[in-house]
Structure formats: structure tokens, C-alpha cells
Amino acid sequence: MTIDRAEMLRILEQAMAPVEREFTDLDLRVKGSIPPDLNGLLYRNGPGRFERGGIPYGHAFDGDGHLCRFDFAAGRVGYSNRFVRTRAYCAEDAAGRMLWRGFGTQKPGGLLTNGLRLRFKNAANTHVIWHAQRLLALWEGGPPHRLDPLTLACQGEEDFAGQLRNRFDPLSRWTAPLLPFSAHPKIDAETGELINFGLVLGHPSRLLLYRIDAQGRMAPPEVHQLDRFSFVHDIAVTRRWICVLLPYADFDIPRALLGLKSPAASLKLETDRPMQALLIPRAGGPTRLIEAMPGFVFHIATAHDREDGGLQLQVIRFPNFPGLGDVEGYFREVEQSNGLPRLERLEIDPDARRCSLSPCNEEVSFELPTSNPGRLGAERPQIYGIGTPAGRRLPFFSAIQRIDTQTNELIQRDLGADLPGEPIPTSTRPDQEDWLLSLVYRAAERRSDLLVLRATDLAIQATIELPHAIPPGFHGCWVPANPGEAMR
Ligand SMILES: [Fe+2]
């Protein structure tokens, strides 16, 4: 199916319409049948509005966080949705205008309103996780927001009993009283331990590592000084290593501070220079810094330790850093540079300090990768994600994909002009494939459906109809019924 560029642009722009209504435990209509073993809760986060007071935000990452909650119980699906009512969201809602700068958004009023305004709005829009009886909405530039798992009411910032309090220099404390907690924590399904990071840019820049036990207690953050600026969205964690891929970045701090540019416009990633792989031993000891490949990686699909002592990562690598500020510009950028994000295998030899990169599949683009939960570092042969089928162009992700990395077999469920979100696995074991849940934007109807797909072949088992449209979003989590019982 071929869709011309103007039509793809129209659909993408139409899909960014704001969410107008909030529902509470609405009984959704189901076509097909919900698998009898599918009981639990799906939470999904993503931007739900892209303007304030008639002024559009300058970047897709700045949209206000909006959560969907689907309650699967004995074949019925109940639906609730809420904006994440952070302090900033409520203040802007009351004022009816933009009060904060964002990652890629300047406040109206130029230098006068942006100069020395060093606190940026925490959009709380990137991920939602369930850990140690806490439901947390995540955004990588700031602390998590804690939510009521039943009503989705925002209960404020989570500082983990003070461990996220910023204890660095006065300027750093003034701009960010709480440290950033990134949007891609890794949870060990066997031990319940959570590992995450935060990046604080400055002189020097610092990478903070957080470890939270199964009871929700955070240890004091571990501080790693970096010798250059960087920009990191995701990390890899195995039994032996924490691996951080550091692209070479330049950040125009004076202009960002003076309010002349947004942080996104002040950030320049030199993707023709090789990234560095920073290896931090989980058991302690000296870190290793190894030259890797050029490009940029948002997401690391899987990571495991090899028996020969090596570390293997499957990453989604962009040849260039995607602008993402305006869709038309991004289409142009991809056409000029063949900038498809592709799934690639990165082998790291920590002792020889060498990296090698090989393609997993050169034919298709891949993004929003997921895999089954399990022990950190367990091998996961199947990777799910979204991609762009033939006849359409990036960033028009209109297929759900599954790749078996051992056989390289690719299965693609082409959704035509519709836009699927991250396929979230419902299995609780790394070696067992059950179901995938993906929220899909229906272009013709301007509405969304939640699809239940069989993970092994992406056959559609059930279509769950929403009464309204949800813009394409980022990440979510599945909470199986047993731990979920306490929430109902
Ligand atoms: Fe992400």
C-alpha cells in the first residue's frame, strides 16, 4: 500500500490533536475475544496536548503527559484516562497560558520571559512503571511523579525518601532541586531490583546511577563523572555490566541559560563521531571507556552477557540525530540522509576494549523495541517494535513487527494508514510468548483502538474500541492480575 507524502503528513498532524475528554472505568466494546488468561492492568503514557493558550509547543517531547489505564478482568476491559496533573500542569491550566520553558519550547515573550528561567517543565510524558507498589510517570529531565494506580490522580514528585535531593553545587540545586530520573529503568523480574540513571550536564557532567530494591528503598546515588557533554535516553543492564552509550554532544549552556535558545536547540549531537561505550561493573571496580560506532541510539532493545566474557546489545541506531521538532522537516532529513533507525547488534569485548557492529535486519526500520521481562541480562531472542512497511516513508510507523534475532525471521503486521504504538508484551517470562498490546491511531476514523495480538505471529486476537483518539505515545507497562489485585 502506497501513501503519498502529503497524506502521511496530514495523518501525522491530525494524530497530534489534543485529548479532550477524560473517562473513568468506561466499559469498552470488544471485537473478537479477550484471551481468558489475559487479566491485569495496562498503563500507557504519552503526550496528550501540544499547545497552551493557543501557542504550540516547539517539540514533540514537550507534550503534556497523558495516561491511559486498561483494566482486563474476565473478558471485560475498563478504561480510564487522565492528564498527569503535575504542579506545572495545574498552574498552566489555571493560568490558561504557558508558564515554563520546555525541552524544545521557549515561552512567548523572547529574552524577557526566557532569560535566566532555568527551571523547565517536567512533562511527565515518557513512561509509566509499576515498582514496589508505586505507579510512577517518568520524564528523563526530572524526578518521577507518583500516581494513584486506581484513579491516576497525581500525588506529587517522588524523591525516594530524599535520595533524589540534589546535593551538588548551588547553581545545580537552584535549577533542579531534585535529580533527574530517566524514563528507561530496568527491573529485574526475579529479584525486583530496579536500576536507573540520570544525566546532569555541566562542568563536569555527571551520570548518576540509582538502585532501588524490591521494597522501594533507594541507595545513595552512585556518581560517575563524564569527561564530555552527552545525551542519553536508555542504558543496558546485564548481570555483570551497566553499559551507557555516550554520543559526542555539544551543549551551548550560555545561550540556553540566557534564554536565547531552548535546550533542544542548544544541543548539537555530532553523530559522525564515534560514541563511547561506558562500562560500569555492577559488582564495583574500575569503569571502562571503549570507542564504539558513530550515530545515535535512543533505545537499547536487549542486552546480555556472553559466555566468552563479551557483552551483546541489540540497539536501534539512527545514522543522524532526528530533529523531531517538525514532521515535514524530519521527512526531508530522512530523504536526504537515508536516516532510517535500524536494529543492529553491538558486540563489546570489555577486555580487548573493542566494539563491533553488525545488522540484524537491513531491510526495515525499527523503533520502540520491547521484549519479555525476566532476569536482567537474560537472553531474549524475540524483539517486538514498530516499523515502516514498503510504500510508506519514515517517520510513518504503520506496522507492528517481531524479529527473531536467532533466525533473523521478520514478521510484519501492516496496518496501512493507521499508527500503532509500542507493542507491550504481557508475558512474565523471557522464554514464553503470550500477547502484545498496542494502542493504534485509526487515521480514517480519527479514533484509537487497543489491539491484542498473538506474540508468536502477530495475529489480531481482539480489537478494543476507544471512544476517542489518543495521539501516538511513548511507553507503558503491563501489570499482571496477581500483583494488580491490590489496586482494584
Ligand atoms: Fe524511550
Image (cartoon, helix red, strand yellow):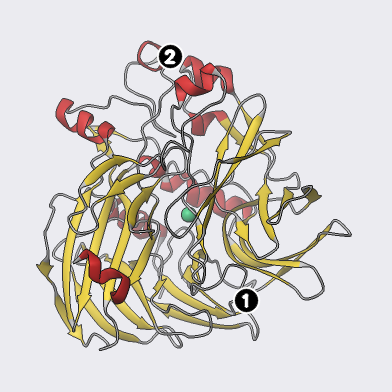
Q: Nearer the viewer, residue 375 or 278?
A: 375
207 to 362, vertically: above or below: above
245 to 54, vertically: above or below: below
Q: Is residue 470 left or right of residue 302?
A: left
198 to 28, vertically: above or below: above
Q: Nearer the viewer, residue 367 or 196?
A: 196
Q: State the image coordinates of residue 162 (x, y, percent, origin top left).
A: 43, 36
Reading the image, the residue beneath label 2 is 115
Q: Is residue 127 something that shows in the picture?
A: yes
The number of callouts visible is: 2
Reading the image, the residue beneath label 1 is 379
Q: State the image coordinates of residue 104 (x, y, percent, origin top left).
A: 43, 34
Which secondary structure lies at badge 2? loop
Q: Residue type at mark 1: give it.
A: Glu
Q: State the image coordinates of residue 175 (x, y, percent, origin top left).
A: 46, 23
Which secondary structure lies at badge 1? loop
